Image (tube, helix red, strand yellow):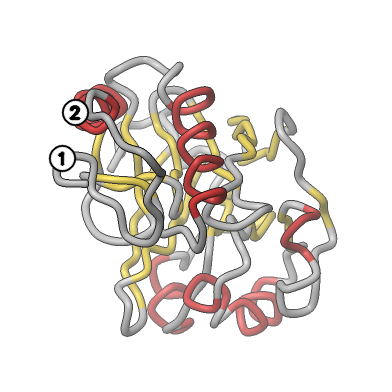
């Protein structure tokens, strides 16, 4: 978590039965923040956000464990909800702001760049500020996010290789569940997967080192 004065603060808030990571991104000087994926336990989330004005709620993708407390967050903060148009129809209450690849979300003095990373869902997105990436369910320590078909798997791999692995190796990937990783560490794990010959692509829960 970045806590130094003047830097964007990244607060990870694990919530719900699936350990979904909600994030509160804060400009400590402006005391303004962006709330990402309020999946459950709204009281816990609002406790962390106390004293911060939430200006936008970003949904990285449409899955229930990432949007379970969304309506409560809307009511509590009165902030507009933003998400990719390809997932917007399945987000409870829809979105007020459509986010496409390359768009920016303001967080006080900071800018969060939207990176469209389809594969886990068609409208999956990540957010980048400096060396901090909110990676949601696109990539985890050890592998990509879960996919339903081999075509989805190929798509998420393309998203990771073309949009995530082009970032500096020391970029921190703040994941949608569990522990963080870095771009450099993930690239090393993927290289093992890519070195193996296979007749067809897998799908589901894939691990770079053993799949």
The vertical placement of 208 against 19, above or below, is: above
The vertical placement of 34 against 27, above or below, is: below
Q: Quadrant of residue 13?
A: bottom left
Check disc 2 and report the residue beneath it. 192
Q: Residue at x 47, y 47 (%)?
A: 153
Q: Residue at x 64, y 39 (%)?
A: 116
Badge 2 crowding class, 10 Å Cα cut-off, few under 14, some 14 to 19, many 20 or more, is: few
N-terminal label among 2 and 1: 2
Q: Position of residue 113 (x, y in %)?
A: 62, 31
Mark 2–mark 1 CB contact (< 8 Å) = yes
Q: Which mark is residue 209?
A: 1
Residue at the extreme front? 199
The vertical placement of 123 against 163, above or below, is: below
Q: What quarter of the picture does the N terminus occupy?
A: top left
Q: Is 140 on the left or on the right of 76, as rendered?
A: left
Q: Position of residue 161 (x, y in %)?
A: 45, 26
Q: Position of residue 185 (x, y in %)?
A: 20, 28
Q: Is 11 on the left or on the right of 109, as rendered?
A: left
**Residue 180 or residue 150, whichever sits in front:** 150
Q: CA distance from mark 2 to mark 1?
A: 6 Å
């Amino acid at each position: 978590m970045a806590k130094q004065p003047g830097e964007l603060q990244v607060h990870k808030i694990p919530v719900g039965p699936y350990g979904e990571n909600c994030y509160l991104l804060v400009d400590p000087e402006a005391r303004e923040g962006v709330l990402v994926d309020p999946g459950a336990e709204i009281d816990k989330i609002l406790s962390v956000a106390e004293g911060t004005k939430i200006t936008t709620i970003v949904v990285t993708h449409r899955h229930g464990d990432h949007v379970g407390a969304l309506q409560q967050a809307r009511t509590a903060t009165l902030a507009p909800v933003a998400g990719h148009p390809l997932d917007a129809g399945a987000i409870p209450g829809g979105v007020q702001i459509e986010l496409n690849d390359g768009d920016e979300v303001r967080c006080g003095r900071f800018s969060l760049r939207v990176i469209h990373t389809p594969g886990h869902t068609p409208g999956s997105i990540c957010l980048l500020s400096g060396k901090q990436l909110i990676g949601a369910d696109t990539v985890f320590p050890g592998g990509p996010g879960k996919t339903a078909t081999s075509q989805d798997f190929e798509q998420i791999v393309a998203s990771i290789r073309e949009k995530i692995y082009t970032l500096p190796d020391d970029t921190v990937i703040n994941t949608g569940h569990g522990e963080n990783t870095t771009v450099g560490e993930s690239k090393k794990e993927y290289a093992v997967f890519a070195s193996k010959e296979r007749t067809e692509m897998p799908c589901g829960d894939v691990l770079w080192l053993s799949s």
